[in-house]
Image (cartoon, rainbow, N blue to C red):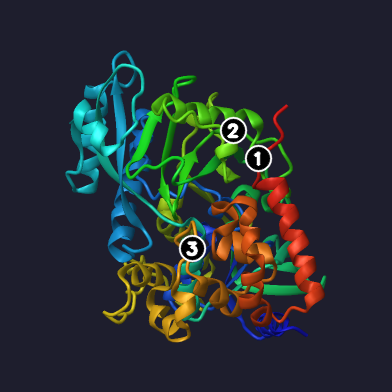
Amino acid sequence: MSASSSSRAALLARLAANDWDLLVIGGGISGAGVLREAARLGWKALLIEQRDFAFGTSSRSSKLVHGGLRYLKEGQLRTTWHSVRERQRLMREAPELIESQSFLFADCQGRKPGRHLFEFGLRVYDLMAGTSSHRYVNAGNVAALAPGLRPPALKGAMSYLDAKTDDARLVLRVLQEARQDGALALNYLAARTPVLENGRVVGMQLEDLESGRSHTVRARAVVNATGVWADRLRGKLDRPPLLRPLRGSHLVIPAWRLPVAQAISLMHPQDGRPVFFYPWEGSTLIGTTDIDHVGDLDREASISPAEVDYLLAAVNDQFPGLSLGRADIAACYAGVRPVVSDGAKAPSASGRDHVVLDEQGMVTVTGGKLTTFRLMALDALAAVQRQWSQQTLPGTASAFPPYRLSDGPVFRPATSLPASLAPAVARRLAARFGAQAADVLNDANASELCFIPGTETLWLELRHAARHEQVVHLDDLLLRRVRLGILLPDGGLAHAERIRSLCQTQLGWSDAQWQQELARYRSIITSHYSLPANP
């Protein structure tokens, strides 16, 4: 048995050894948020994920922790208000992981929305945040802030602030906080069939996708936080579909080919949809599309040739001198958003609010945004508490754990690091590991505290993840624990031998298993993270 297998076996052994208060199904940001808040309350909480943590939308988002400025245009004031407030909260709690990002929106003669309408929206945006970050920049200063930004009829630009993050790492940090409070999280463990008593869900039959073994887990409450897969689990209770899956696709360009310090935001000249590109992890990220996704949800989403052309056209509209083309693209990725169907004709007009449903004792939380995961978690746990209060007989003490609305921080403060450490390395460790940063540093050697060329990733992150972060497959390591798979051409395979030397022993893989995992990873990169064939 390999080291990783023995560690997984020890975690699986805890399934039957505990009397669970809460079973959370889904290892994206929604499920991680629910687990974190439940663990804070002292509940015995278990999370299971059918693939890897952050496998779905939560590693394939636009990586923005933003208030949703465009939702003001759609009249979604409640969504914007909650998003802005949560953005500010997260930036205070984990400023290394959730970073401020300045945006420029070019003001062009004859193009909507126009300076005055956009500035009005920014005033509302800042008012909600309790800040004053926006200003108008004349054309001369635009050239200094973003050299080469020359869309047709440029007059100036609006400047404002939002925030960005590493979405997969955000999930892992939230899970880290939950584990520190006693929670258990397991990947590659799928929910198959609800366990029913008197017509109510009291547990779940599970399948370990690595061994094929079955497990039955009972819990006082079950939360379905499976994102775009939520309807599948609801369907086992004969509930009608709720979601409209929408695909958002992105391009990743080497920073030298599209060098921007500001995020550039625009309304696409073809259809008036918002598009942006901004510096991320040492590259430049371009996104996003917003189209109905009709593919098999069990197959990883992929960008289409039409989406590639659409996103390149947006960049070339703003930077006509670059002539950016397909040959400049290092990687692509696509995610499917769990948007609640509201009858809107255009995908971008669909609301981004979340919903919470109690159906035969199973609480489903879905929809929403990355930014508002904490609010989604609190709403889901409030629904659980309503269940428990109804099960307590008048005049008797509750047999269930207490619940109170939490206003505590999601993240513990990052530990202090030596002043002699390079500031960029210290910030990186604090962002990735938070309260565990000092322990991770103590386990490092000097050669591992260097950045992988073309990225902001430390070599140390690979070995630490392989040893401590429940890596089951190579794509878990390179696409979600670190992001080399979407930052470097060919998924970072040029560094395969160095990665092998750092990680194979930590993972306990034989030479044959390493080659098998390498072939699997290469296939995933080719099929889902590389340019599609141009018809």
Q: Position of residue 88 (x, y in %)?
A: 28, 54
Mark earlier in primary sequence (3, 1): 3
Q: CA distance from mark 2 to mark 1?
A: 8 Å
Task: Choose between 429 and 228: the one closer to the eye.
Answer: 429
Relative to 505, residue 381 above or below: above
Residue under label 2: 308
Q: Position of residue 37 (x, y in %)?
A: 44, 68
Mark earlier in primary sequence (2, 1): 2
Observer-side mark, 3 or 1, equals 1
* Mark 1 residue type: Leu
Q: CA distance from mark 3 to mark 1?
A: 25 Å
Mark earlier in primary sequence (3, 2): 3
Relative to 529, residue 110 above or below: above
Residue under label 3: 169
Q: Where the N terminus falls, by quadrant?
A: bottom right
Label at residue 531: 1
Q: Position of residue 427 (x, y in %)?
A: 34, 68
Label 2–label 1 contact, CB within 8 A: yes
* Mark 2 residue type: Val
Q: Is residue 237 left or right of residue 409?
A: right
Report the residue at 43% width, 73% height from top: 433
Q: Position of residue 398 (x, y in %)?
A: 48, 77
Element marked by disc 2 = helix
Report the residue at 65% width, 34% height from top: 304
Q: Is residue 156 left or right of residue 13?
A: left
Q: CA distance from mark 3 to mark 2?
A: 26 Å
In this view, the residue farthest toward the top is 110
Label 3–label 1 contact, CB within 8 A: no
Relative to 455, residue 14 above or below: below
Q: Is residue 436 visible?
A: yes
